Every structure is written in C-alpha cells, then in structure tokens.
Image (cartoon, grey):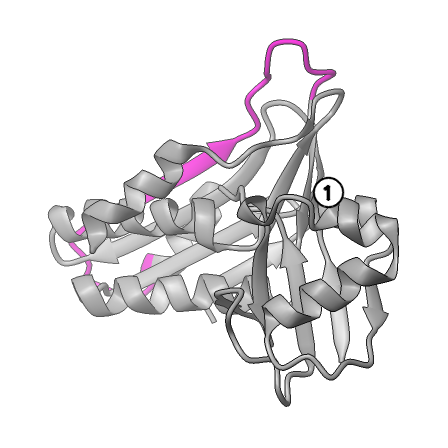
Amino acid sequence: MAVSVQEADFDVAAEMAALTAGRADIGALVSFTGLVREVAGGNGGMVLEHYPGMTEKALAGIEAEAQKRWQLQACRIVHRYGALDPAAQIVLVVTAAKHRQSAFEAAEFIMDFLKSRAPFWKKEAGQGWVDAREADEEALSRWR
Amino acid sequence: MQVLYFAWLRERIGEPKEEVETKAKTVAELVEELRAREPRYQAAFADMAAVRVAVDQELVEMSASIEGAREVAFFPPMTGG
C-alpha cells in the first residue's frame, strides 16, 4: 500500500526515488511536503492526534480516488502523528503521471481532502486545539 | 459497542473509549442517551455543529444508523495536513 501513517520522520528524496525506481513510463513527478509552522504566541511545536485504523482507510480512499481521476502511474502519501517540533515535516504527497498537469492536480486534490477528511487533529503547544478552517472546507468544492 | 472520542471530545469525556450498551438506533439517539447520563457528556456534546461522527470508521451524518455497528467515534472537524 502506498499510504503510511507513522510517528517517524520521512526522507523526501528516498520516497521519490522509490516511486520511480526501475520505471521509464513516468514523465512527471510532483511532491508536496507540509511542515510545522511556528504560530505567534505558541510555545513551539504541536501534537498530532489521529484515529488508528480509520486514518489509513481514509488516506487509502483519497489516494484511490486520485488514481481513478488522473490515471496516476504511482502515488505515495506519508502522514506523521505524535509530537512534532517547529519546522518538522508532517506530511508528504508524491504523485507520478505521464504529464505534469495530472501530477500537479492530483497532488492538490489529495492535500485538499487530507486537510479535512482524514482523521487528524492538531493541538498546538500553549494554544490548544486548532480549529478547522472554513477555507479548507471550501477548497473541496472545486473538485465536485 | 465501542464508543471512541478524539481531541477535545476525549478531553471533555475524560477517556478515549468505552463500551456502551444502547438501544439507540441512530447516532443522534445515542448522543441523546449519553447526554442524559452525566454532565461531562453534555459538555462534550454541547455544540453538535462542532462534532463529527464515524460509524465503523466511515464518516456519516448524525442521522445515520448504528444498528449492528461495532465502533462509533466522535471527534471535532479534522485538521490534517
């Protein structure tokens, strides 16, 4: 399965290399990495809670939908949970397609759904639970 | 069935999961039952616009059936990414 939910950090270059290893049918490889951004007034860092079992299913579902819509050659999603320091990597999405437009769009689609349809909850140190953003919900409407 | 709580719902209820015996047929009925039990449930379910639910790990509406369900999970809107 091309979806991982893990506490450990990930290596972007290694993940991308693994996706294209031994293949010559991929013309476009897009990657997105999400990082922990320091917020004003925060103590730094956050804890990411998730729903073991459902998280993997939700990510696999989002990935399957992207595969179907854009006929991706390959796809990889890695999402971390647990305690994360400022500037730490949180999420990686890599999409591989014949042409760039499919790879770009699929990566955006996956990130848009992952934001508000995968069971993760962010709690910022000294700030409490992060509220869901209206803009994240609205971002889904363009894919309908 | 197992009832799970995440994020601030877990904090307000005071535990991550519990075994619940219920005759409720829908999520909404289950919420009413829990609310009637103790103030901590009333606190957790005070604003249902801020609560999402999954039945057997699938996101559903509050009107969804829970008959035969093994697992019902309550949590706030998700903030992944």
Residue A30 visible? The answer is no
Observer-nearest of B61 and B75: B61
Observer-nearest of A10 and B54: B54
Residue A57 falls within the magenta-colored stretch? no
Q: Residue furthest top?
A: A41
Which quarter of the rendering shows the C terminus of chain A? Answer: bottom left
Q: What chain letter is assigned to the residue under label 1?
A: B
Q: Is residue A119 left or right of residue A43?
A: left
Residue A41 x, y percent position in the rendering: 67, 9
Residue on which disc 1 sits: B8
Against A44, residue B73 (above or below) is below
Q: Residues within 10 Å of mark 1 (few under 14, many from 20)?
A: some
Q: Is residue A73 left or right of residue B77?
A: left
Residue type at tag 1:
Trp
Magenta region, residue range: A20-44
Question: Residue A136 is drawn in which quadrant?
Answer: top left
Residue at x 74%, y 48% (from the top left corner): B44
Against A135, residue A28 (above or below) is below
Residue B20 visible? The answer is yes
Against A77, residue B7 (above or below) is above
